Image: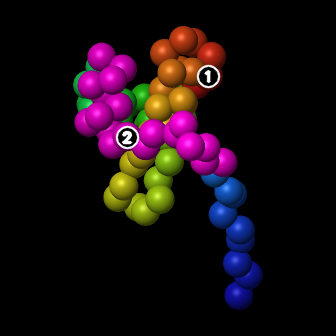
Amino acid sequence: MTQTATPAIAITSDDVWMTPREAAEYAHTTTGTLSTLRWTKNGPKFYKPTSRRVLYRKSDLDDWIMGGTK
C-alpha cells in the first residue's frame, strides 16, 4: 500500500481560520455563493481537513477580495 503525503499548509501567527459562515460574513456574500465558487473553482482558496469540514484563511480571503488569487 502506498501512502501519499499531504501538502503542508504554512501557518503564521497572523492566520485566522474561518468557517464558511464567518468567511461569507467577512466577504459580504452568502454561504451558498461560497459553496458555488468552491464547486466551480473560482473562489478563494479553501481547505478541507476532513470530508465534511471547509475552512478559509483570512489572508486567502483578503487576496481573493483584492483580486489577487482565485
- In the image, what residue type sits under mark 1? Thr
- Check the image and name the residue furthest to the front: 13
Q: Which residues are magenta?
A: 10-28
53 to 33, vertically: above or below: below
One can see residue 16 in this view: yes
Q: Which of the two residues, 18 or 68, is positioned nearer the viewer here? A: 18
Question: Dot 2, crowdedness within 10 Å: few (<14), some or many (≥20)?
Answer: some
27 to 54, vertically: above or below: above
Residue with the mark numbered 2: 18
Q: Quadrant of the N terminus?
A: bottom right
Residue drawn at (61%, 43%) of the image: 12
Find residue 69 and name its label.
1
16 inside magenta stretch: yes
- In the image, what residue type sits under mark 2? Met
53 to 12, vertically: above or below: below
Find residue 67 and report its image quarter: top right
The total number of labels drawn is 2
Q: Which of the two residues, 40 or 29, is positioned nearer the viewer here? A: 29
Which sits earlier in the primary sequence, circle 2 or circle 1? 2
Local SS, label 2: strand
Mark 2–mark 1 distance (CA, rounded to whole Å): 18 Å
